[in-house]
């Protein structure tokens, strides 16, 4: 498939894409808002001539935050525009940066929409987070002489095989990228094999290791646990869970309650449209549950707190003694394991970690990560870490050690972006 055929198919599929937005809007009304931005119509006022950063959703926005703050500090005279594709990503960007950055949805990858967006923005540099590759946007940048960097890039073997099946589209697109800052050498080799220019591929490491934790976070969490009178309660978190995982997590909680009657679970679904259904599931299964968003206090009888707020995940991690990271008991590829590790939490996950293979391997080899496959193993691992303080402390120390050993990727990336800006 080449770019012309891709563009034709995208145009043919556009009505279905818009219908899907309206369908998703039934459960999450924010999907029906600002649709014009997705077609480069009715864009907000945008000051031109700055740096454009694209982070598809919440995870990428969080990963990009240290880089964006560093760019703001290094280039205070340049406006920074941050785009995303999802309402949750949009909410996260606004929560992180407020009015200090420009923000809108990225228009769909159609030549006329990309051209209208870039003519309005006229960026000096485009930075795309991870593997969000859009052929027409990249080509329109190349036509205008706008350098494009793929930052914190990752490419699993599975994704590489997928891209390889469309070599006529993938190879020209990758050849137009001016920098591919990859996390590992294995990923660098995959990008080169798919058609990226060898001189444009740099191994900088993962900027996710450069995560900085607000020092006020742990004291705030300790204060809230005190208000709940839960300082001595066994407390664990299951974060970023997907459909198919909640029942496993709740089954593990029921097992834990048999041995630890005062056990408290913080359950944080990945997607906001599932908040209500997960809460109802807890109630149906006979678990005493409250929702974080209501402000209802956790009582001694509360067994599950549903984390149904945005922008609080790090704080909720800080509340817990043990952290399970979701998207990993189902074949979704996992989510950021470094956030709980940076807070010194023993980290548990399922076996499906293909989006974070290198990070997972380092944490596992250091003794900071344990993998489980079902409710029985999950409950057993959580209970063991509650009982064995030394083992929990060992995972705490190992996780922090892995982060410290791998930091520096952000500075290496910034040096490469400075080179592109000064070109």
Image (cartoon, rainbow, N blue to C red):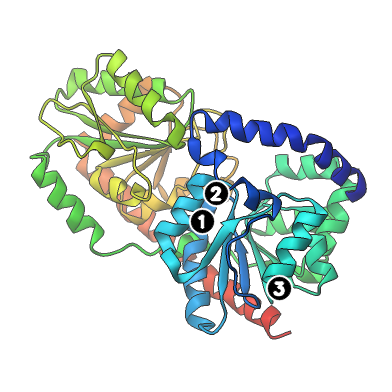
Give the alpha-carbon distance from disc 1 to disc 2, as whole Å: 6 Å
| Quadrant of residue 277 within the rendered picture | top left
Q: Position of residue 121 (x, y in %)?
A: 67, 69
Q: Position of residue 339 (x, y in %)?
A: 40, 52
Judging by the rendered image, the residue that carries numbered circle 3 is: 122
Could you tell me if the residues under marks 1 and 2 are in contact, i.e. CB atoms within 8 Å? yes
Disc number placed over residue 61 in the picture, else none:
1
Left or right for 274, reference 138: left
Left or right for 5, reference 162: right
Q: Position of residue 305 (x, y in %)?
A: 25, 33
* Above/below status of 182 relative to 259: below
| Quadrant of residue 120 within the rendered picture | bottom right
Instruction: Out of 142 and 159, give the one closest to the viewer.
Output: 142
Q: Nearer the viewer, mark 3 or mark 2?
A: 3
Which element is circle 1 on?
helix
Going from the N terminus, do you reach mark 3 or mark 1 first? 1
């Amino acid at each position: 498939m080449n770019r012309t055929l891709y563009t034709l198919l995208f145009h043919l599929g556009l009505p279905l894409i818009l219908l899907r937005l309206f369908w998703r809007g039934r459960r999450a009304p924010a999907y029906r808002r600002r649709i014009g931005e997705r077609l480069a119509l009715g864009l907000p006022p945008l000051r031109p001539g700055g740096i454009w950063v694209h982070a598809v959703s919440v995870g990428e926005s969080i990963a990009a935050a240290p880089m964006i703050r560093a760019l703001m500090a290094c280039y205070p005279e340049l406006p920074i525009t941050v785009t995303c594709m999802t309402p949750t990503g949009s909410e996260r960007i606004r929560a992180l940066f407020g009015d200090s950055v420009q923000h809108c949805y990225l228009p769909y990858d159609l030549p006329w929409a990309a051209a209208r967006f870039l003519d309005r923005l006229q960026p000096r540099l485009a930075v795309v987070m991870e593997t969000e590759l859009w052929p027409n946007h990249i080509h329109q940048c190349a036509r205008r002489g706008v350098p494009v960097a793929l930052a914190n890039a990752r490419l699993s073997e599975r994704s590489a095989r997928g891209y390889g099946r469309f070599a006529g589209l993938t190879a020209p697109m990758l050849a137009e990228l001016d920098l591919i800052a990859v996390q590992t050498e294995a990923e660098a080799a995959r990008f080169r094999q798919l058609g990226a220019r060898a001189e444009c591929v740099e191994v900088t490491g993962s900027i996710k290791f450069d995560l900085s934790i607000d020092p006020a976070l742990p004291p705030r969490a300790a204060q809230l646990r005190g208000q709940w009178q839960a300082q001595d309660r066994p407390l664990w978190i299951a974060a970023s869970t997907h459909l198919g995982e909640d029942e496993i997590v709740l089954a593990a909680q029921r097992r834990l309650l048999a041995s630890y009657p005062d056990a408290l679970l913080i359950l944080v679904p990945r997607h906001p449209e599932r908040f209500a259904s997960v809460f109802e599931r807890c109630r149906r299964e006979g678990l005493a549950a409250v929702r974080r968003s209501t402000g209802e206090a956790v009582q001694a009888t509360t067994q599950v707190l549903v984390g149904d707020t945005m922008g609080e995940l790090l704080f909720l991690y800080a509340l817990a003694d043990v952290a399970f990271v979701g998207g990993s008991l189902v074949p979704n590829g996992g989510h950021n394991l470094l956030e709980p590790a940076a807070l010194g939490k023993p980290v548990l996950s399922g076996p499906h970690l293909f989006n974070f293979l290198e990070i997972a391997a380092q944490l596992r080899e250091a003794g900071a990560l344990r993998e489980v496959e079902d409710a029985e193993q999950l409950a057993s691992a959580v209970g063991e870490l509650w009982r064995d303080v030394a083992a929990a402390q060992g995972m705490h120390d190992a996780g922090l050690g892995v982060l410290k050993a791998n930091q520096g990727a952000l500075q290496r990336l910034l040096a490469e972006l400075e080179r592109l800006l000064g070109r």
